[in-house]
Image (spheres, helix red, strand yellow):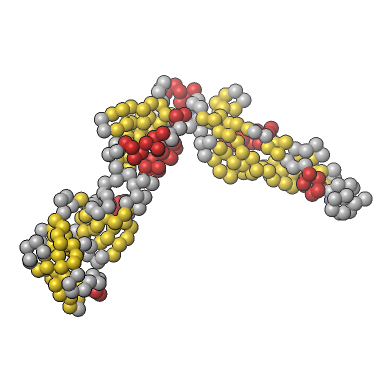
Amino acid sequence: MFCPKCGKEGNGLCAKCYLEGSELKFKKTEIILCSCGKVHYHGEWVHEFESAIEGLAGKNLVVPSEINVEKLVFEILSKNNKRIFLKIYVAGKYKNESIKTEVLAEIKVINKTCESCGRISGNYYEAVIQIRPDDAENIKDIIDDIDSDFITKVMDVKNGIDIYITTQQYARELVNKFKNRGFDIKTSAKLMGKKDGKDFYRVYISVKPPRFKEGDFIEIDNRIYEVAETGKNVICKDLDNRITKTVSAIKLQKGELIVNPDVRNAVVSSVSPGEIQVLDLENYETYDLKNKKNKFKLNSGEEVKILRIGNRVYVV
Ligand SMILES: [Zn+2]
Ligand SMILES: [Zn+2]
């Protein structure tokens, strides 16, 4: 006999053609998890996450009637606080033929608080985000988008709000949104005691407006930078070598804003190899500046702006 679909020799419809017509499927499945990692399984909160997944994988896999499952292995492809994605490898028999196939499965995560976490406090929280915006309108979309399932409470405080969050994972997700807008983030942790035998920390995350804005002058390690672009990365022009590049957040932490910078109109009064001279149009003083490798790319007579800091002079 031959397979009526592909013509392969054998006993009627072959395994490959059978599986094409009757795929293995995965039923809509949910799992209840607590932020501490426990899973609600068979009516109780347990730590055995993997065996709960294995149980759900076996129970919710729909196998066509002609297939006898002999072995089932799963792999967690990805996991977040909304969904778990699995790949389930199935080995078994179709009539007398051995088959191997795989199924992608999605399990919806329901976030709940287990008894022991609930017991710690009626208003449980693992993180507090202290948001102090300069303009509340700028962050309205982020605030409106917060998933209330993770919020214990929101407190109005002077200059902003404190948001109490049930899981540190969600707090991190939220803080990243502010980080991506260039906000200044500082995190501190406080040891609160033990939870399920492990040290339990509560984190406090301060979210403040970006410290520097475009056009600001900053001094870092005796060098002067002009902020060219803010946002996720801060891009600055180093006024010493006139190179524009990204300045790391760590370096920016050391930066001092130059308040009321003394910026003046000036004109390039002469250009010679290795040096230019500028004339300050406010007091008609002239300054000689090193023009190494012709970094200024300026011509005599060109109008420029200069920044004076003490006796240092920079072309902006
Ligand atoms: Zn076939
Ligand atoms: Zn828990």
Question: In the image, 183: left or right of 75?
Answer: left
| Image position, residue 4 (x, y; %) | 88, 49
Quadrant placement of the C terminus: bottom left
For residue 193, say whether it is visible.
no
Identify which residue is drawn at 36% across, 38% down.
139
Q: Nearer the viewer, residue 124 or 285?
A: 285
Question: In the image, 147: left or right of 95?
Answer: left
Identify which residue is drawn at 70% across, 39% down.
25
Q: Is residue 35 above or below residue 266?
A: above
Image label count: 0
| Image position, residue 257 (x, y; %) | 20, 50
Q: Nearer the viewer, residue 315 or 284?
A: 284
Question: In the image, 3: left or right of 169?
Answer: right
Q: Is residue 95 above or below residue 40?
A: below
Q: Nearer the viewer, residue 127 or 267?
A: 267
| Image position, residue 300 (x, y; %) | 18, 74
Identify which residue is drawn at 34% across, 47% down.
182
| Image position, residue 13 (x, y; %) | 86, 47
Residue farthest to the bottom?
273
Q: Dividing the picture into quarters, in which one does residue 124 lie?
A: top left
For residue 159, say whether it is visible.
yes
Residue farthest to the right?
1
Q: Is residue 105 above or below residue 240?
A: above
Identify which residue is drawn at 41% across, 26% down.
152
